[in-house]
Image (tube, rainbow, N blue to C red):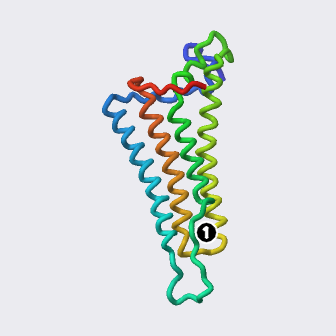
Amino acid sequence: MALPRSSYDPRRVFTIAFPKFEVGPKTRQIGTYLAGILFTFSFFLLFDAATLSSHAKPPADSPHDVVPVHMSFVDWIPAICSTVGFLITSLLDKSHLQSAFSGDSWGSEGPAAVRARVVLFIGVAFMAGGLAGSLTVLILKYIIPDYIGYIYYGGANVGMNAGIMLSAMVLWVAQSGSDEYEYQLTV
């Protein structure tokens, strides 16, 4: 299969270009506010589950040796990882990622681009690890021991971490259109 010479660029990985989102000032504000709302709602889910957990009592008709399940520090570790990943990806200067292909030949990116990619990878890995950790806590702590009435705690943890990842994606797209604000992170 022959590729057309006019649109072929050996530095590109895919032959179909990813569409560039054109966002105006209002769209940027709306995206930023939407990301903030998602971030806040995500933490609300976790705080709601923690509050319910701290006031949990066994049912009145249960035997006296039944102890209710409470959220512990293990439930908060995925949330901490996702929040750190969100902060890392939000503070990254995106212009360093785009300058990676400004060299004359393939693979001649500067050290700033390589460092920016490593920092971005670390941030996304923290968020993915937080989501995987929350799924693990849900399965091992709430589903396998068959705590029917307490599955909301694990589900809120998974919802919180998924909301943080979605908030990071919305913020990334909203801020990728213009350089009205610049965040400086020296690596």
Residue drawn where x is 63% and y is 41% of the image: 125
* Residue under numbered circle 1: 142
Q: Residue 137's image quarter?
A: bottom right
Residue drawn where x is 61% and y is 59% of the image: 73
Percent from the top left, x then y, of residue 135? 61, 58
163 to 21, vertically: above or below:
below
Residue drawn where x is 60% and y is 63% of the image: 72
Can you name the residue that lies furthest to the top here? 104
Kind of residue indicated by mark 1: Tyr
Q: Residue 15's image quarter?
A: top right
In the shown orientation, is residue 73 left or right of residue 54?
right
Neighbour class for label 1 at 10 Å: few (<14), some, many (≥20)?
A: many
Residue drawn where x is 50% and y is 35% of the image: 90
Viewer-proximal residue among 19 and 114: 114
Number of marks in the rendered image: 1
70 to 86, vertically: above or below:
below
Location of the N terminus (image quadrant): top right
Percent from the top left, x then y, of residue 110? 64, 16
45 to 167, vertically: above or below:
below
- At numbered mark 1, what does the secondary structure look like: helix, strand or loop? helix
Viewer-proximal residue among 119 and 76: 76
Viewer-proximal residue among 54 and 29: 54
Can you name the residue that lies furthest to the left here? 26
Percent from the top left, x then y, of residue 149? 53, 75
Percent from the top left, x then y, of residue 7? 55, 17
